[in-house]
Amino acid sequence: MEKAAQKLKNLRKQAMPKLTVRAMADALDMPLGSYARYESGYDFKKPFLPLDLTRRIAEVLSRHGIDPTEVMKLAGLNEDEAEPEARAIEAAKPAAQFVTLAVALPSEDALADMFASLLALIPAEASRAEAARILAQRLPSGFAAIGPVAPDGGRAIATAPAEAAPAPAIDRPAPPRS
């Protein structure tokens, strides 16, 4: 029988986007060493995780595509006991809110300068994922360095999306048979 520590480690590794042990500990607001012990088969030999900790882990992993029901089983819950816990975790997730905003961007030259300065921060040995993370973290400060953008006397450049979003599928009646 697979131990809770190994199951926990496997579930964390299945998370998308990926979660490191450190990221998991940070998300749980606990010291790295404390969380790492729960994933270590040498340090944590119990068959089940504590229920409160499992709830917190399920909440974090559910944001990364892991079924909370599977996580709740780490606390020794059977399917019937885990399902209500999982529903409560899913219900507590914040709903996404979408807004449309008019945004004034700096000139193309100013954006090119900003991106050049941001790209200079990326180490040559960085992977694409690491480079993307660095750019995502630094983009707000890059925009802040450019300063405020004033509207250009009422001139606006409208750009059309390269491809219109596909219309949602709808049920259509079947054509009459001849």
Image (tube, rainbow, N blue to C red):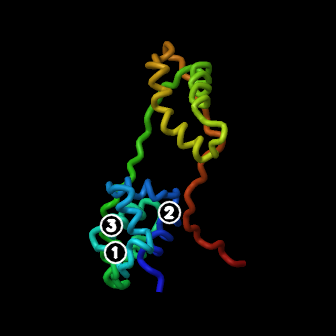
Q: Distance between the residues labelled 2 and 3?
A: 16 Å
Report the quarter where the C terminus lies.
bottom right
Q: Mark 3 points at which residue?
A: 89
Q: What element carries label 1?
A: loop
Above/below status of 30 relative to 89: above
Q: Nearer the viewer, mark 1 or mark 2?
A: 1
Q: What element carries label 3?
A: helix
Q: As shown in the figure, which amino acid type bears the numbered disc 2?
A: Ala
Above/below status of 118 relative to 162: above
Q: Badge 1: few (under 14), some or many (20 or more) residues near its Cα, within 10 Å?
A: many
Q: As shown in the figure, which amino acid type bears the numbered disc 1?
A: Leu
The residue shown at (52%, 65%) is 13
Please state which of residues 53 and 99 is positioned toward the viewer in this rendering: 53
Residue 93 lies, in percent from the top left, at: 34, 59
Residue 82 lies, in percent from the top left, at: 34, 79
Q: Name the residue under label 1.
A: 49
